[in-house]
Amino acid sequence: MNTDFLSVTLYLLEGFGATVKIFLITLLIAIPLGLLICFGSMSKFQPLRWLMRTLVWIIRGTPLMLQLIIVFYGPGLLGWTAFSVEMATYITFSVNYACYFSEIYRGGIENVPRGQYEACQVLGMSKKDTFFRVILMQVVRKIVAPMSNEIITLVKDTSLARIIGYYEIIFFGQKYIKLEGILWPLFYTGAFYLIFSGLLTVLLRKAEKKMSYYNV
């Protein structure tokens, strides 16, 4: 392996592409899935409500690394068809973050003053119109900050995927220790995380400022 700065950078960029893939797929699935779990946990149908709340309790109460190991190795040990490394990674991250997002959604919805629901009811608005025309944007405004924290955490959590053999950027950086006996490429991976997290922080803060219009 070439160990000059440019070669290392290009090689780590390959691993960083895999890291970004975990990040994007997780958000694409977890954001809408979290809303469904939120509605389930707030349902008046008690079995569904307790099922969703139990799922959230288990996922939030156990380490993401343990969940990755269970999803990847569990099906095979039970005699079922095992997931590929990529599929196990995407499923685990998506469900994990969906459960965290669901609690953020629930907190945002419950923090909207009850009087606004009652006012919409007096005006003859349906529950659907009340939620999408009046409540939704207020909820989005309330959850931008906590969602931003979870999104930044996701950037760093992607490194856990290497525990089941997913070739993300840390995995690529570790190769230099094993094959070349040098450490600096592994430390260099931190620059990728810092830059990516910094860009996301700027974008999310701009989004939060724009959403301040809906603050009531």
Image (cartoon, rainbow, N blue to C red):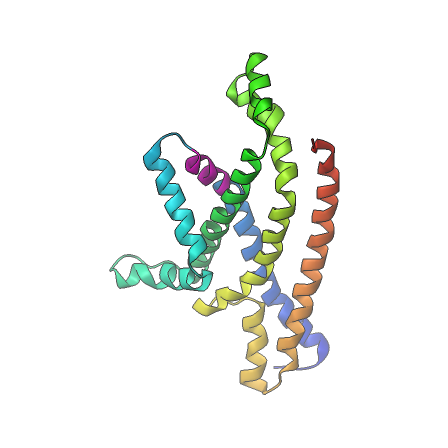
* Residue displayed at 74% across by 52% down: 202
- The answer to which of 214 and 152 lies nearer the viewer is 214
Q: Is residue 201 above or below residue 192?
A: above
Where is residue 197? Give x, y as percent: 67, 59
Is 193 displayed left or right of 172 in the figure?
right
Taking the magenta stretch, the answer to whether it contains residue 35 is: yes
Where is residue 29? Give x, y as percent: 50, 45
Q: Which residues make up the magenta segment?
A: 34-42
Is 123 displayed left or right of 30 in the figure?
right
Where is residue 2? Give x, y as percent: 65, 81
> Farthest bottom residue?
181
Q: Is residue 209 above or below residue 187?
A: above
Helix, strand or loop: magenta stretch: helix
* Residue displayed at 27% across by 57% down: 80
Taking the magenta stretch, the answer to whether it contains residue 21 is: no
* Residue displayed at 69% across by 48% down: 204
Is 166 displayed left or right of 204 in the figure?
left
- The answer to which of 49 and 23 lies nearer the viewer is 49
* Residue displayed at 57% across by 55% down: 23
Q: Is residue 189 above or below residue 71?
A: below
Which image quarter holds the C terminus? top right
